[in-house]
Amino acid sequence: MFEIGEAVWVGALGDYCTAIVVHASGLWVAASASGEVVMIDPVSSQGQVLAAGTGMAVSVLGMAAAFLAAAGQDGVVSLWAMPSGRAIDRLSFSGWIDRLAWSPDGKVLAIVVGREVVVWDQRIVARLSVETTVQDLAWSLDGRRLAAGVNGGVKIWSIEDWDREPEVIRLPTVVVRLAWSADGRYLAMGNQDATLVVVDWGAVDRPWVMRGLGGKVRHGWFGGGRLW
């Protein structure tokens, strides 16, 4: 038996909640299927509407130390400064956006737009072609590499030169989840065919392949140098 704590904020969204993130300052941000984005201060119990409902769902929220990103059905990525909640930019694209990822330092945002990855660093600095649907994005922990899981393997770009051709790890399946080890040495790939593949960055041609899983790998992370 457990007791439910006292509610710090009670409010109504126009539709069901689609995403929740928490800022390092303790502020909560929630989004809904009707398009609202609300920032909640649990100390003052006040809610601030960052975006009013448009009738089009917000699919994903991305939080960094200095920024909040929200995107969804309308193809717009909205950006706010954190923790103030001040609007700073709106990026408009064609098509539903449901994946984005901040670099570890919270300064660079990668956005999946159809069959390309758009990179924002105070402005759009790169459009990376992937020729197929991107299933997952993962930054290496040092922020130097960005990996995209796709049908047929993984593409990996260097932040030092977005125009350089990406390194490619080829697999006969769809890569649906990615995780880097903290030291950047290992990259793990959870795949549609219920395999888990781990590569050593110094020997990508000799991957470790784990089979016999009950289904495709949906989540994974490295902790203490080990994959969980």
Image (cartoon, rainbow, N blue to C red):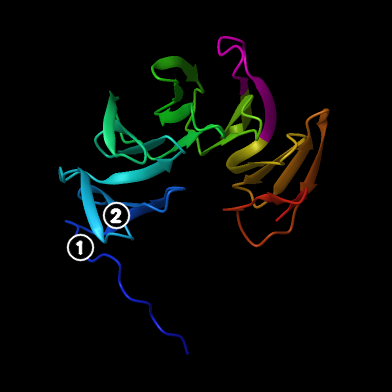
Left or right of 110? Residue 139 is: right
Mark 1 → mark 2, Cα distance in angstroms: 10 Å
SS at mark 2?
Answer: strand
Q: In x, y percent, where is residue 133? A: 47, 32
Is residue 205 inside the magenta stretch? no
Rendered position, 47 above or below 51: below
Q: Residue furthest bottom?
A: 1
Q: Earlier in the sequence, mark 1 or mark 2?
A: 1
Q: Are marks 1 and 2 in contact (CB under 8 Å)?
A: yes
Q: In x, y percent, where is residue 126? A: 47, 15
Can the viewer see residue 19 in this picture? yes
Q: Amino acid at mark 1?
A: Gly
Q: Give the foreground label among 1 and 2.
A: 2
| Tag 2 residue | 40
Decide: few, some or many residues near mark 1? Use Cα within 10 Å; few <14, some 14-19, many ≥20.
few
At 38% from the left and 80% from the top, the residue drawn is 4
Toward the viewer: 104 or 55?
104
| Tag 1 residue | 11
Q: Amino acid at mark 2?
A: Ile
SS at mark 1?
Answer: loop
Left or right of 203? Residue 18 is: left
Decide: few, some or many residues near mark 2? Use Cα within 10 Å; few <14, some 14-19, many ≥20.
many
Is residue 163 inside the magenta stretch? yes
User: Which numbered circle lies on residue 174?
Assistant: none
At 26% from the left and 64% from the top, the residue drawn is 9
Toward the viewer: 113 or 141?
141
Can the viewer see residue 36 in this picture? no
For the magenta stretch, what is the residue range? 157-171
Q: In x, y percent, where is residue 225? A: 78, 48
At 65% from the left and 35% from the top, the residue drawn is 141
Q: In the rendered picture of this protein, how many numbered marks are placed on residues?
A: 2
Left or right of 123? Residue 217 is: right
